[in-house]
Structures are given as structure tokens and as C-alpha cells.
Image: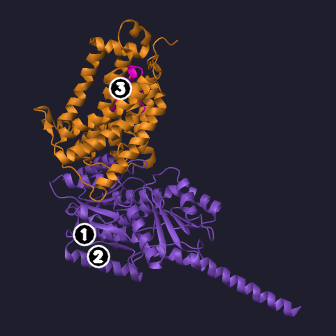
Chain colours: A purple, B orange
Amino acid sequence: MSKFFGKSMIATLFVALMSGATFAAEVKSIAILTPEEGTDFGWNQQGVDAAKAAAEAAGIEVVVASGLGYGDVRPAMREVAADGASLIIAHASGYATAAPEIAAETNIPVAIVDSPNALKKGLVADYTLSGHQGAYLAGRMAAKMSKAKHVGIVVSGEPPSWNSQSAGFAEGVKAENKDVKITYAVIGPAAYSDAAGGRRVTESVIASGADIIFGQGNGSSFGMLQAVETAKTPDGGKVLFIDVIGDKTSVAKEHLLTSVVWDITPVYTAMINDLKDDTFGTKRYAIGLADNSVKLIKTAQIPDDVWNDIQKVREQIVSGEIKVEPVFEATAVRGLMTDVSAAAQ
Amino acid sequence: MTGLFSDTFLAALLFGAVTAAIPLLLAGLGEQMSEKAGVLNIGIEGMMIAGAYVGFVCAFYSGSLWVGFLAGAAGGMVVAALMSLLCVRLGLNQIVIGIALTLGLEGLTALLYHFQFSRSYPRLPAAETLAVPLLSDIPLFGPALFRHHLIVYLAVAMVGVMAWLYRRTQFGLNLQAAGDKPAALDVAGIDVIRTRTVAVLFSGGMAGLGGAYLSNVGAGLFIPFITNGAGFLGIVLAMLARGRPIWVLIGAMIFGGCLSMTTAAQVAGVNVPIDVIQMLPFLAVMAMLVLFGRRASLPAALGIPYERGAR
């Protein structure tokens, strides 16, 4: 009996080890699905570029399905699942409902955003990211450089990731100089492609006195950029723009002050490793200043002394001396802006 | 808070209201003629985005906004020609075709833009404005209302032209008859199909012009889906206007004004949830619907294809 029991234990252990080895070997490719083309100098481009980089580092294939829009992406997900993807990255908050359904249907793991409570071991992971630490630095920089002592935040919607950056920026401005006014304006409900609205609202914020605009808007951010390039402050001064997630330096040299750039590669790399380790769907992923997955870009508009000061603040955040907590709720963000506005008056 | 509301800021708000209203006005005037003739042009959004794309491309390469406006109007008319072929000539369902055209044009323009500009995102310089003598010097209102591109004044002038056309010309009567009693028009020896075709082509041209204005002046650039539902708002305005062009203008200005008020309220830090503030333009349109929509009378044959001899 004991002999049989011992053999059974060995057999079970062998099967368990082999199944683990088989699981690891099955991570052959990843697929990323994006709502817009991966050439937007923003969220979609950073996602696609990161997926390619992570796949290359892991020696696996990557399938990119971009420009899928915000409608029903289930057919596209089924297609990449049928093609043998080991992981489907659903790179839009609007995909967070469909992707877990596809995971349950096909048994292929999915990664979604803006749904931190949807984790399911082995099947569903969430990567709601926040560049709030970088936005805080951008706020410190804006407060230092604003000649009008008035900055603006323009957003085309209020998803959690953007809220945390708006809050981080406002906190940075306040920390640097509490007398700097902050004007906060939302273009419209889900106005992600409303470039004309982005320009109109940004021009109004500039006319209210702001000379630095922190903009978050997908396609509409090009309308914000257009406003910054064509409008002047009430006293005839130049207006500068702070972008997020991507790097628009190549298309906006003269008015781009900086950008809070995200590198999502470490996140996707961690997901691939978690798949291999069978820990996928058990934890959340984050980006930050410490590993440079969030960073500010240096442009010609930033004086060296300002840049050096900001780098010192960065080190204080990395060391934990300064703590910047994410604020995801829109109500809390708006409350913060109201407080800032009141304090400034 | 009051310090924020300088003349410069208020002028920017009013200027923005006019800029937001003009595409709606142009699309609404076009839709109004189409509906008068009995064709429910749901494809106006698609015609707008076609005009926005073609208008931007032509303005960008030619360096002339006027070339862009003309090309945008032509682009809208090409789509309208397809709509008139399918719905007026062949009698297919106007709603289905309109939606199909809109979806198709959104996809096509996004695809073309991706191939051409997705690495460069070109933008146009600020549009030159024309200051109306004396009026443009009025404090606050002058810079906001009387310093715009010439196309803005022409768009407003179109309201008078359309009113004259509908009330004083034989063609205006033909349009009315094509929408209310097409068989009677036919009996009178007027070609119903031709009358409706002209109306749809005109609506496409106006929508395309509105789209070109949106991309060339409103945004100064094109991005996929830039119209963001402006064409559908134009349809609503046309329906509420009860066939009167002046109400299209009033509705468009109310909507544009409300958009600017949402910005003003946010900048002022009004302690109301932004979601509520942003409902303002749509609430205004709904209020118009309740106040005036009940008396709205749409053409009796609206949306019904005309077939000679059919009962």
C-alpha cells in the first residue's frame, strides 16, 4: 500500500511539474487590440510599442489589431484567440466587459484596463495605470514656468487614469506655488475625438489667463495643441502645452513644454512572466518614476535650472520623501480643482 | 471668480459659441431643404465627415481655405449623389442607407487619414478673420461676433437666402409639394425625382461645407470621427425649425452658446457636477423640442419614396 502510495505521489509530482512546463511553453504569442491606430503619439501607440518590445524581449510573437473602434470587439478577440494567442491585451477601457467574456469562452487569458476588481486567477488581469507621479512633476514645472501664474487643465473625458494625472498635476502646482491659479475644463462627455471642441475649450481657458495647458485628450489633444499654437495669452504671450502618455515632440516642437511619457513595456513583460509562473490575474500592475516607466521628456522649452530642480523632486519621490497618491474618482479630482481655485483667489 | 470673467475671456466664449454653431447651421439648413422635399437625410453626418476630410486635404495641399471649402462641399455632394441614387431614384429605405453611408464614410476617412497623415498630424494656420467695419469695434461683442472668417457671414446670409427661396420662388413651392403631395407636383408636370435629387444634393453640399468649416476653421486639422455627431444635431435642428431657416440659426446659436456656457461654468468653478453642466446644451435642445416641437409639422411624404402611379 505504501509502495503504491509512494509511486502515486511521484507520478502526481511528475504530472504537476510537466503541466507547469507545458504551460510555460504555451506562451508563444501575445495579441494587443487597440481602438485607434498605433500612430497617435499617445495611449494606442504606447500600448502597441510596448507589446512589441515585451514580446521581442521574451522571444515570442506579437499580433497587433489596431483601429478597432469602441464598438463590439468580440469577433476580433475570437479571431486572435483562434489564431493561437496566449494572451489577449484589450487596450481600451471600453473592452473591459467583452474581454473577460472571451476569456471565459476560450480559456485564453486577457488583460484589461480600468477594472481593478475584475481579477480572476489565470484568466483576467487588470493594468489600470497611472502617471500621477509624472504629472506631479509636470505640475511643479508648470508652476515654476508660468509667467501669468495661471495654468489650465483640459481633458476630453474623466477616465480613472486621467483623473489621477489631473490630480497629480494640481497637487504639484500647489506644492510649488499655492498662488498659481488652476483652471480645469472638460470638453464634453467622452469627447475623445472632438478636436474642434478641444480647440474651443482650450482657447477659452487661455483667454481666462492660463499660459500653460496640461492636456489629456486622445485625438482631441491635437485640437488643444492647435489652440496653444494659434492663440496668445491676454497680454500677448506665448502659450505652452504639456502632453501625456506619448511623445509629440516630432509634431509640436515650438509649444510642447514636456510630456508625461508612459512606458508600458515592464507591465506587459511582467504579465508574460506571470503567465509562465502561473500567477497571472493575482496582482495589479503599476508604472512609476522609479523604473522610468513614467518620465518627463526634456524639450528645448525647459531651462536647465528648472530641469535640474525637477530632477531633484523626482529623486525625492523615488526615495519616498515626497508621497504622491493616485486619485481616481472624478468627484475627488474636481473637488481638488475647486479647492485650488478657491485658494488661488 | 469675477476676475476670471475679463472681456477677453467673455469674448473668447462668444467667439467659441459662433464657431461651434456654424457647422450645425450649415448642416441644418441643408437637412431642412432635403426634408422639405420629402427625403429624410440621415446620412448628413457621413456627408459632413466626407466634407471635413476632403476639405482639409485640399486646404492643406493648396494652402487656400476657399479651395478647402469648395472641395468639402463637393465631397458632401458626391456622397449625396449616392444617397439620391439609392433612395430617390431606386426608392431604398432612407434611414438604412443614411446610416450605412455614415458608417462607411467614417471608416473610409479614418483609413485614408491613417495612410496619409498618421505620422505627421498636419495642422492648418489660424484662419484669417474679416472685421466688419464699426461693428467689430463694439466692446466685448465686436471681437466676438464681428471678427470671423468670411464664410461665417455667408453662412448666416444663407438663412435669408433660404427663406426667400422657400417663400418667393417657384422652386421653393416645388420643394414643399415634393414633400407634402408629390403626386400633385407630378400631375402639375414637375419632375418629383429631379426636385428631390436637387434637394438632396444641396443638403450634401451644405453638410460638406459645414464639415470643411469644422476641420479647417473650427479645429484647424482633421482627425477620424471629428464631426462627433454634429450632423445628427443638424437633423434635430432642422426638424425643430418647422421649415423656417431662422429657427435653424436660432437653434444652432443656442446650442453653441450652451457649449460655451459649460466652459464658463467650469472655469468659474460652479459647484455643480460637471456632468450636469455638460448636459446643458442637450437640455436646451430638449427644451426647444418641448416648447416648439409640438407644433412642428413635418412634410406628409417625408421618408416615403415616390413612385409614379403608386397608391
The reply to whether the magenta stretch includes residue B36 is yes
Residue A144, numbered circle: 1
Residue, x 31% and y 23% (percent of image)? B246
Residue A310, numbered circle: 2
Q: Which residue is mark 3?
A: B200
Q: Is residue B272 visible?
A: no
Tell whether label 3 touches label 2 (CB within 8 Å). no
Element assignment for label 2:
helix
The amino acid on which the numbered mark 1 sits, given as a three-letter code, is Lys
Farthest bottom residue?
Answer: A3
Looking at the picture, how far across and down is residue B136, in whole percent? 14, 35
Chain identity of mark 2? A
Q: On the same chain: label 2 and label 1?
A: yes
Residue, x 59% and y 79% (percent of image)? A24
Tell whether label 1 touches label 2 (CB within 8 Å). yes
Looking at the picture, how far across and down is residue A150, in whole percent? 26, 59
